[in-house]
Image: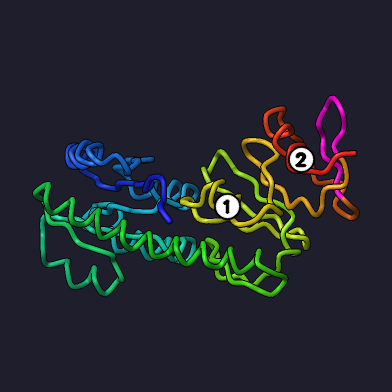
Amino acid sequence: MKFEKLSVIIVDDQPACADVLNQDLLEFSDIQVIGVFNSPEKAIKAIVRLQPDLLFLDVEMPEMSGLELLQNIRTQMSPELSVVFYSAYDKYVLEALRSSAFDYLLKPYQMEELEEIIERVKTNKSLHLDKFEQSMRRLLAGDHKFAIQTVSGLLLLKHTDIICFQFIEEVRSWQMLLVDRAIHKLRSSTTAKNLLDMNRTFVQTNQNCILNIEYLMSIENGTLQCKLYPPFQDVEISFSRRYYKKVKDMLDII
């Protein structure tokens, strides 16, 4: 299974260094830099909100060290977050490794060194995605429990536990709504195709919603608003014209 792009945030108090790294990362077609910050304080909120796949973190910064920043966000981040410390001083290498950093890049680096790190991150990410796909396949193969890794932790679920998946534009990731009304955020690398490929039980109603069709009772003419079976009538979901046609083609309509 392949991911689309790795989302990256750069934190470096030296704007010139951050800009160089940002420009170098533009050379990778499967990398998307979603934030560059020169202030650790400002970076923390964005990192937690955006949940990047990869974090380039300067070790030595005046307001807060990169090691301190990582400690502050660890409990709020996905276990799949890859961290690359980078610094002009190799004395930080051992401490970075003790902090479970994914890798370490010395300034000034060679492009070949950056390429090697990106390849290692991609390999690591692919392994996690394969595990995710296997878990989802186990879910939809029957009604037994399966394991799925969310941002907050590992969940054991049944097929009937899930009402829908909704894509949240502000954080650029899918979240899962369960029948107990709990909401769980999925990893930013999860795509609509990942979810739809699992089973015909999940259908896309619009660009930002995938519904478990077992909970769909009716679709209103004109508005294309969905009405779900009780007690989920208050969940607001609608079809777009494009996806309505697709679902009509798959249903047996009298």
Residue 44 percent coordinates (x, y): 41, 51
Instruction: Say left or right for 176 vs 113.
Output: right
Vertically, is 13 above or below 220? below
Residue 223 magenta-drawn? Answer: yes
- Quadrant for residue 38, please give it: top left
Task: Identify the secondary structure beneath mark 1.
Answer: loop
Instruction: Say left or right for 68 vs 194.
Output: left
- Quadrant for residue 69, please give it: bottom left
Colour style of the rendered protein structure: rainbow
Could you tell me which residue is drawn at 20 percent across and 42 percent down?
21
Residue 153 percent coordinates (x, y): 55, 68
Could you tell me which residue is drawn at 76 percent across and 40 percent down?
237
Residue 140 magenta-drawn? Answer: no
Q: Quadrant of the C terminus?
A: top right
**Residue on which the image places disc 1:** 197
Residue 88 percent coordinates (x, y): 11, 55
Task: Identify the secondary structure beneath mark 2.
Answer: loop
Question: In the rendering, which numbered label is found on residue 55?
Answer: none
Callouts 2 and 1 close, C-beta under 8 Å: no
Classify mark 2: residues with Cα within 10 Å, few (<14), some (14-19) or many (20+).
Answer: many
- Mark 1 residue type: Asp
Q: Which residues are magenta?
A: 219-228
Q: How many marks?
A: 2
Could you tell me which residue is drawn at 19 percent across and 61 percent down?
104
Viewer-closest of 232 and 58: 232
Classify mark 1: residues with Cα within 10 Å, few (<14), some (14-19) or many (20+).
Answer: few
Q: Main secondary structure of the magenta part?
A: loop
Residue 223 percent coordinates (x, y): 83, 27
Could you tell me which residue is drawn at 77 percent across and 37 percent down?
248
**Residue on which the image places disc 2:** 237
